[in-house]
Image: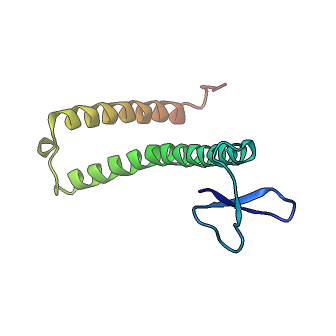
Amino acid sequence: MPYVSRSDDGKIAGIHQEKTDTANEFLESDNPELVSFLTQIGQQQDGKQGEIHQELAASDLEMIRVLEDLITTLIDKRVLMMTDLPKAAQRKLSKRYALRSKLTDLGGIVGQNEEIMLP
């Protein structure tokens, strides 16, 4: 191991454990060209994983709001009681409700008074 296949321009295109019709060239594992190819593949994978992690983090923030709205709806419809939740969850939800309430209150003040100018 490793046998490599090459592209038309002579660069390594793939690595195989066994000799095949397209991968019939054996390279030592410490071959500089092979090491460079593997490093490049690793960097590409890390970059893709980084993008996926960023998308998941952004999605997590969106899902938090969805879950908050779902819990509020269940409580409003009396399917779930706030006291059914663990104390830590009750505290976190209460804090978020209080913060959202402050935003709503501020929005009402600004919306009702046309003399207030925002930067």
Which quadrant of the figure has residue 78? bottom left
Residue that appears at 12% across and 46% down:
84
Residue 2 percent across, percent down from the top left:
62, 56
Q: Left or right: 11 with respect to 91?
A: right
In the shown orientation, is residue 108 left or right of residue 90?
right
Give x and y (percent) for residue 22: 72, 71
Quadrant location, the C terminus: top right
Picture coordinates of residue 109, whole percent (x, y) = 48, 30
What residue lies at 73% left-to-right and 41% top-to-bottom? 32
Quadrant where the image shows the N terminus: bottom right
Colour theme: rainbow
* Residue extending farthest bottom: 21
| Image coords of residue 114 (percent x, y) | 59, 32
Residue drawn at point x = 65 percent, y = 72 percent: 20
In the image, farthest residue toward the right: 9
**Front residue (pair 105, 63):** 63
Extreme residue toward the left, this view:
83
Q: How many callouts does the rendering have?
A: 0
Q: 104 left or right of 13?
A: left
Name the residue at 69% across, 67% down: 23
Q: Is 95 placed above or below 62 here?
A: above
Q: Is residue 115 above or below residue 112?
A: above
